[in-house]
Amino acid sequence: MLSNLYTNINTQVTDLTKNQSTFTIILIMAIILTLVFLACYNLVIIPQKMAKNHLDFICNKIKQGDTVSTQNGNVGKVLYVFKSTVIIELENGCKTEVLKQSIKSIYPTSHTKTHARTHSTNT
């Protein structure tokens, strides 16, 4: 009878230990999964949000007379500003309409075209 009680207690303790180790493994896996998610968030989502905020800032800051450079390398003076596009005059006198999202940088009206041109090749 006593040996039967000892065996019963021994099996209960063994089952408790197995359950505790399973819980520990699940907890460690949850912590690792959380760390991987945080790493992905910091490496992908935050820079993407920062770039979008910068693009929105540039789109709202454009005004007539600014010198701008586009993502494809065109540098020109802003003639007209519309809701989602701007018309710029390039150095050779050609006027072209570009999306605001394609503008990479803005140079205030005090800068000359030569300064904007040399500045855009450095970036």
Image: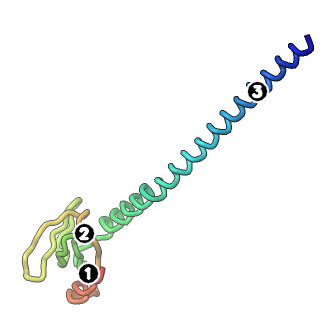
What crowding class fits label 1: few (fewer than 14 Cα within 10 Å), some (14-19), or many (20 or more)?
many
Depth check, front residue: 31 or 59: 31
Q: Residue beneath label 3, please?
A: 14
The first of marks 2 and 1 along the sequence is 2
Q: Is residue 112 above or below residue 100?
A: below
Q: Amino acid at mark 1?
A: Ser
The first of marks 1 and 3 along the sequence is 3
Q: Position of residue 13 (x, y in %)?
A: 80, 26
* Residue 42: image tag: none
Q: Nearer the viewer, mark 3 or mark 2?
A: 3
Q: Residue at 50% x, 55% y: name it.
A: 39
What is the C-alpha distance between the residues marked 3 and 2? 67 Å
The first of marks 3 and 2 along the sequence is 3
Task: Give the quadrant of the C terminus.
Answer: bottom left
Q: Secondary structure at mark 3?
A: helix
Q: Residue beneath label 1, please?
A: 120
What is the C-alpha distance between the residues marked 2 and 1? 12 Å
Q: Is residue 1 above or below residue 102?
A: above
Depth check, front residue: 108 or 23: 23
Residue lying furthest front in this view? 3
Q: Secondary structure at mark 1?
A: helix
Q: Nearer the viewer, mark 2 or mark 1?
A: 1
Quarter location, residue 114? bottom left
What crowding class fits label 2: few (fewer than 14 Cα within 10 Å), some (14-19), or many (20 or more)?
many
Q: Residue beneath label 2, please?
A: 103
Residue lying furthest top in this view? 1
Q: Position of residue 42 (x, y in %)?
A: 48, 58
Q: Amino acid at mark 3?
A: Thr
Q: Secondary structure at mark 2?
A: strand
